[in-house]
Amino acid sequence: MSEAGSKRRPGWGDVFRSPAHFFALGFGSGLSPWAPGTCGALAALPFVFALHALGAAAYFAITLAAFLIGIRLCARASELLGHPDHGSIVWDEVVGMWVALFLIPPSATAVLAGFLLFRLFDIAKPWPIRQSEKLGGGLGIMADDLLAGLFANIALHLALPWLDTAARALW
């Protein structure tokens, strides 16, 4: 059986096989045997702070480029792993997390809330998130997390006035 049709579990050798694999497998976070999507979203967080430091225009441009490049990265990784959306492919979660926190002040409370909201929308997949997966290929892999990130971002913007007040009351 060819490697493309093997549907095998990737390892660290796959992460470093090529830059495409390195990114598609979320810098290795997608290799986690437990909740690789959550690990991919966590791997995105240090970059959020760097993106915020660059300013909104650069944050947007880098995230858009990461999304567009991610379509090809995820499609290629899917071919090599022999699965249309292998669980170890988490570049979509990385980019979705960046979308979730776009234009959100990077406080600990906001980042935690953004992370939880993103994972909620990514796992529950309300309409139209689930339907976007039907696009197939790399676009289908990336689109559902883009939408989950947008949903989380909107919810987070609506909740921002209460987040810091609630956090202060709890602590």
Image (spheres, grey):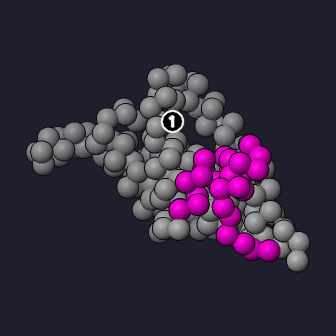
Residue 17 in view here = yes
Can you give x and y, in whole percent of width and height, for residue 147 in the image? 56, 54
Q: In this rendering, would 63 be left or right of 4? A: left
The kind of secondary structure element at disc 1 is: helix
Can you give x and y, in whole percent of width and height, for residue 137 in the image? 77, 62
Can you give x and y, in whole percent of width and height, for residue 125 in the image? 52, 67
Q: Amino acid at mark 1?
A: Phe
The residue sitting at the front extreme is 13
Q: Going 53% across and 68% down the picture, which residue do you hit?
A: 33
Q: Going 49% across and 51% down the picture, which residue do you hit?
A: 41
The residue sitting at the top extreme is 54
Magenta span contains residue 9: yes
Magenta span contains residue 47: no
Q: In this rendering, would 153 be left or right of 86? A: left
The residue sitting at the right extreme is 2
Q: Going 63% across and 30% down the picture, which residue do you hit?
A: 61
Q: Going 50% across and 47% down the picture, which residue do you hit?
A: 43
> Measured along the vertical axis of the image, is residue 134 above or below residue 92?
below
> Measured along the vertical axis of the image, is residue 76 above or below residue 171?
below
Local packing at callout 1 (Cα closer than 10 Å; few below 14, some 14-19, many 20+) is some
Q: 69 or 7: nearer the eye?
A: 7
Q: 50 or 80: nearer the eye?
A: 80
Q: Quadrant of the C terminus?
A: top left
Can you give x and y, in whole percent of width and height, for residue 167 in the image? 18, 44
Residue range corresponding to the magenta coloring: 6-32
Q: Quadrant of the N terminus?
A: bottom right
Count of numbered circles on the image: 1
Tag 1 residue: 47
